[in-house]
Amino acid sequence: MTLLLPALQSPTGPGASREAARFGALSLTYGELAAASTALAARIADAGRVAVWATPTAETVIAVVAALRAGVPAVPLNPRTGEAELAHILADSEPTAVLAGPDDALPPALEKLRRVTVDARAFERTEDHPAVEADPEAPALIVYTSGTTGPPKGAVLPRRAIAASLDGLEDAWGWTGDDVLVHALPLFHVHGLILGVLGPLRRGGSLRHLGKFSAEGVARELGSGGTMLFGVPTMYHRLAEVLDAQGGGAERGELAKALAGARLLVSGSAALPVHDHERIAATTGRRVIERYGMTETLMNTGIRADGVPRPGTVGPPLTGVELRLVEEDGTVLTEPEAIGEIQVRGPNLFSGYLNRPDATAAAHTADGWFRTGDVGTVDGDGYVTIVGRKATDLIKSGGYKIGAGEIENVLLGHPGVREAAVTGEADPDLGERVVAWVVAADPDSPPRAEELADHVAGQLAPHKRPRTVHFLDALPRNDLGKIMKRSLHAG
């Protein structure tokens, strides 16, 4: 706790009256959060590991801070997780208790655990006890991966990694205690919980969580003192749609003014299409900046607040992070713009996968680099561009390496396209052919497939044109707005 959240050491210390977090009408000061977490920490001090029913509420914040204070590893649970996946996570992580809000209805899989109720409106006040002086290598959180290649794996995140990533972002973004962060991200994953909750608390700043994302909520909170906005591409796309709306009136004007007044607009968890970058910048004069991270590595790169925003890139490595690109045979690539797998190492890395030494070893090289499975390029200035996942976004067609992301950006620039995803499908002649999955701007009058293929070939190169175009009503997405491309292949 002392390593991670110094502003929460005492319920009565300096700054105790400052707002720490706000969820709707419920606001917690630093003093109240310290008191509530101190009382809860005493109740779970003997727990070997605790699960947190991670709803987007103040109770989740109190629960996670209490676990950090007690030195007890916390396992955030997605309340929308299905029965089979939840059962796997519980069997793998073996928590002895579950922390949940007073009104939370828990599924049967959690009935065998001791339930510890967390109530942000009625918490016990105890004596001012200092937090546990935990080893920096001690596990703070166990966050489960999405499980796209098998059952979800529990990434063990030590206190050291969380501190390193948040301090790297402090350096890159000039993040201070004066910043007020606005977001509506889920609190069971790295983006919303570590960056979006522990980030402002580590700096001594404030969090305003919208509960449910809306353009109106963003405008209201940024317009009343918010300085930073965190979101995923789906959220920024919806904001761009409001800004583009004809006759949007007061809502459009208030949103444009609020976004223009923010110190930082940050997008993560997936690539923000260049088309949405440009639409927001044209209306507000502000550029959205991007960063790149993973559950296992936390934050790797980020556009600096004092740097040059370049749509489509995620900036240079953060302080302390080493990054390199490698070929499939392990050859390190040094030429600018070469495409290769991204590997990283540094204090931001996880300790390993819980109960999976085999998977931990396979994810690292012999000299300690983590294999991200992401493919990208690095330009002469050190800016990283993510091509996509090695398994789904690197298409090898006719002897060429093609990144799905650049084709998606071009498709999204076509006026007849609302959403787009690109995959590679087996082809007896080309090895793989480029396949586009498109949601039309006007479902009753979609563009012709040939028109879209020619549009791509005209802006990129003939070999990057989609050979097949599928039209869908919507693209499959997960809770963080990422397109689930394996579902497209399956469909």
Image (cartoon, helix red, strand yellow):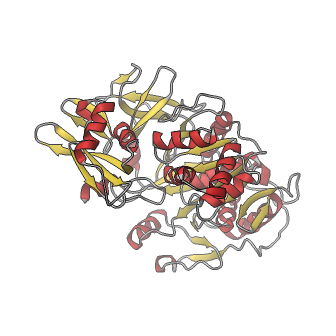
| Residue 473: % across, % down | 34, 61
Q: Is residue 137 visible?
A: yes
Work out whether residue 281 or residue 15 is closer to the camera in this orientation and state it.
Answer: 281
Query: Which residue: 55% across, 61% down?
Result: 75
Furthest residue to the front? 247
Residue extending furthest left? Answer: 428
Indicate left or right for 44 with 148 as reference: right
User: Is residue 89 toward the left or the right of residue 44 in the image?
Assistant: left
Q: Where does residue 388 sit, x and y in percent of width and height?
A: 38, 41
In this image, 6 relative to 108: left or right? right
Up/down of 285 relative to 210, above or below: above
Which residue sits at x=57%, y=39%?
282
Image quadrant for the C terminus? bottom left
Residue 476 falls in which quadrant of the image?
bottom left
Along the line of sight, the residue nearer the viewer: 211 or 106: 211
Q: Residue at x 49, y 78 (%)?
A: 107
Residue 161 visible from this viewpoint: no
**Rendered location of residue 30, percent (x, y):** 80, 58
Q: In the rendered view, would you say 220 is above or below 415?
A: below
